[in-house]
Image: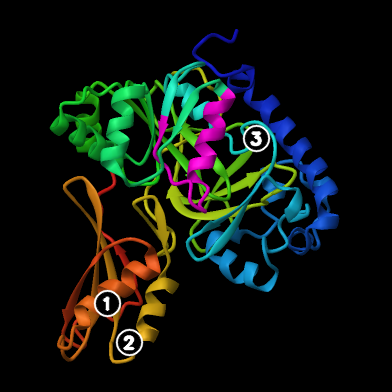
Amino acid sequence: MVTNAHYDAGEIQDPASRETALFARLRSLLNEAQAGAAALRQQLEGVATDTLVDRAALQRVPVIRKGDLLALQAKNPPFAGLSPVKPGTLKRLLVSPGPIFDPEGRGDDWWGSARALFASGMRKEDIVHNAFSYHLTPGGHMMESGAHALGCAVIPAGVGNTDQQVEAIGVLKPTGYIGTPDFLKILIDRMAATGTASPFRHAVVSGAAFPASLQQEIAGAGIDAYQAYASAELGVAAYETSARSGLVVNEGLIVEIVRPGTDEAAADGEVGEVVVTRLTADYPLLRFGTGDLSRVLPGPSACGRTNMRLAGWMGRADQRTKVKGMFVDPAQIAAIGRKFPMLGRLRLVVSREAEQDVMLLKAEAATSGDGLQAELEAALQAATRMRGTVEIVAPGSLPNDGKVIADERLVA
């Protein structure tokens, strides 16, 4: 029986029934979508759709990885031949760093974020402060659509303008927060400094690391915060629940864990790359490799939801790294190197300071004169849309290991 603890009956259905329904929907969707999606046809070459009856059969289909999208979209703009519909029929055409172009289709809760918000305790007529960006990127729209599906009112705050946001919070008194955990801490600190009482009681955070120390600080402020695993291509793929034991996979998705560097399923419990098939008619992603590492947790969730559970984000299978909710790609660092041919190796080090993501670009150069450091800091900000610092190091001092981005953040 569905109670107020679950969004709908789909969350507590028999796992075998869910699996059968997912693969039936997959076959139907692929039969409809192939005619208008050249990349899907190529991906399915040699594989008959009516044979895709289970996960073992699905492994015959090659994985398309997120890191390939930039090149694929350049060859076949705007969506690499992965969407069977005309761009003008979509609701929004969005841009992520790279640039990578992302569609948003029409329909309620197209991104699947409502379940994550519901699991955090947000309900109809709640006021929700959405601090994900609304400028070009999908984050703000992704989470707003779920809040609207629940019947919540949304403050479209976006990022920045902290004082103005705190002023609005003081008047409008939202009980829910959606955004990165880093920015939630900034808002909490600013409210404390200005004597503004925090009205937040529930939060869904994503896009950045959420270490135990920050979890404790936010809980200490009276906020019940839950994590969501989301991407611009997939929407919300998994979300934390009251069980506080891993992330429950969202309905309407087929999630696999594959051995990094292969398209083959990893053994039960083994850490591997998260690969997702999204059953959405206007953007049906088939075996989409996220580049994120995780593993499947055994057994059902104590919250009663019966879908697969992931252990959460456990690092990157590639070097593409999320910083402050935005991806940084090795290609962006390579582009900086091309602008400054006097440099040797470059390495972007991502770490945490004062519960914030920080970037340090180490650059090999024979000299640091003539304002080189300042020029590189400006180039880094232009390439990534985020501020970082630069350290000039001696030629030959960076390891010759092919690593361009080093993520030194601790995973909780």
Does residue 408 appear left or right of residue 74 in this picture?
left
| Badge 1 or badge 2: first in the primary sequence | 2
Q: Quadrant of residue 241?
A: top left
Say which label, 3 or 2, has the lower sequence index: 3
- The image position of residue 287, as x and y in percent, is 64, 52
In whole angstroms, how far apart are the C-alphas of marks 1 and 3? 44 Å
Q: Which mark is residue 252?
A: 3
Where disc 2 sits, the SS reads loop
| C-alpha span from label 1 to label 2 | 9 Å
Identity, as a three-letter code, of the amino acid under mark 3: Gly
Contact? badges 1 and 2 (CB < 8 Å): yes
Q: Residue at x 28, y 92 (%)?
A: 342
Residue marked by disc 2: 340
Instruction: Please report the bounds of the magenta region as a residue range.
Output: 129-149
Say what amino acid the circle numbered 2 marks.
Answer: Phe
Residue position for label 1? 376
Categorize mark 1 by other alpha carbons within 10 Å: few (<14), some (14-19), many (20+).
many
Residue that appears at 34% across and 51% down: 324
- Residue 45 visible to the viewer: yes
